[in-house]
Image (cartoon, helix red, strand yellow):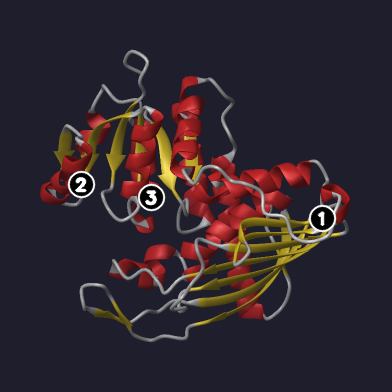
Amino acid sequence: MIGDRTRIGIIGAGFISDYHIQGLQAAGGEIVIISSITEESALTKAKPYEIANATGDYREVLDRQDIDAVLILTPDFTHRDLAIQAAQAGKAIYLQKPMARNSTECREIIAAARQAGVPLYVSFMHRYFEEVERTQELLNENFLGRIFSVRQRNATAGAKWASWFYKKENVGGGVVMQLGVHGIDLLRFLFGDIVAVRATLAQTKHEVVLADGSVVKPDNEDLALITYRFADGMIGNHEAIYNEVAGTDRFRMEIYGEKGSAWLRTERGRLAIYAPQYLGHSGWFTPDLTSQDSGLRQHNHFLQMLSGEVPSDRSAQDGLISILVTEAIYRSADSGSWVEVEQP
């Protein structure tokens, strides 16, 4: 750390990098260098954000002695190797979800970070939405009572900006790994451990037209219908979909408890609560949510963890567990039966 600012290097200048750059700069982090697959694409990303250094060689990021941490925002099939190299270079690591393509790669990343003695975090942006934070408060204070069930929906028209999403080898699966993992983490974050799953998967599209007009032929699933059994006995239903024109606005969640219900990111708004005992009246209540800047909250938390202002979270372990859940989902779809989730 130079002075009172954390200095950051970024590896990867694709679609998700804008979110992280904006969040880091808003939170007071200094981005020293960004790399991409070509110097030209790195420069194109760096210029509007006034990032001083851009390179087509990620090793220049890892070799710099004037940065404290690296963000790895590259395709899934690169995560393991880049994260291990970053750990060996002595850099704190913030790794875009999913952590890796399988649990073996996740464990290798965790082992490398532990051996090098560097912090390791996995980016799960949905945790930082204000409506999620407010819902966590409701659950912690038992305003909804015992929770019986939850419905989670993640749906988009698919990732149309790159072909690598549509190859199982690149992502370790399909929509479950790429989109569903957001929902898996969010459900675990709010409701605890998932102990068993039952799933049905399908590939509904055999050709996808990308934004540049090129056509790819997917070999992975684009539809998943999943049921979860949680450690406390609660049941959850989860849809992960890569073939819906309208899609969801990030996600949709419905929570049903003995004292009330809560809906997140639905037609009722970002958060709506029906809890007569808590509210003192019947009918839905929509609290005033003042901020939409989840990126600022997420990256401020990251910088605070790096500086020691707050304890480190367990997102690296959660990153591994989310992949263990996805692996159970694939086993369940193959067997047609309930499958227990391996515990780390």
Please give the name of the residue rendered at 39% of the width and 39% of the height, measured from the top-left corner.
23
- Residue at image position (40%, 72%) is 158
Give residue 79's mark: 3
Report, in whole angstroms, how far the alpha carbon at label 2 lies from the one at label 1. 47 Å
Q: Residue furthest left?
A: 40
| Closer to us: 22 or 3 | 22
Badge 1: residue crowd in 10 Å (few <14, some 14–19, many ≥20): many
Q: Is residue 87 left or right of residue 328?
A: left
Q: Quadrant of residue 245?
A: bottom left
Identify the amino acid type marked 3.
His
Q: Amino acid at mark 2?
A: Lys
Residue 194: x %, y % from top left: 71, 57
Image side of residue 255 versus residue 122, left or right:
right
Report whether 244 appears left or right of 187. Answer: left
Q: Amino acid at mark 1?
A: Ala
- The answer to which of 245 and 269 lies nearer the viewer is 269
Query: SS for tag 2?
Result: helix
Disc 3 crowd rating (10 Å Cα; few below 14, some 14-19, many 20+) is many
Residue 163 rendering spot, x and y as whole percentages: 29, 70
For the residues bearing labels 2 and 3, Cβ distance under 8 angstroms:
no
Instruction: Kindly tell me whether residue 124 is visible in this rendering.
Output: no
| Marked residue nearer the N-terminal end (2 or 3) | 2
Residue 243 x, y percent position in the rendering: 45, 79
Label 2 to label 3: alpha-carbon separation: 21 Å
Residue behind mark 2: 45
Tag nearer the camera, 2 or 3: 2
Pick whichever of labels 3 and 1 is earlier in the sequence.
3
The disc at residue 275 is 1
Could you tell me how far apart the alpha carbons at marks 3 and 1 are, in whole angstroms? 43 Å
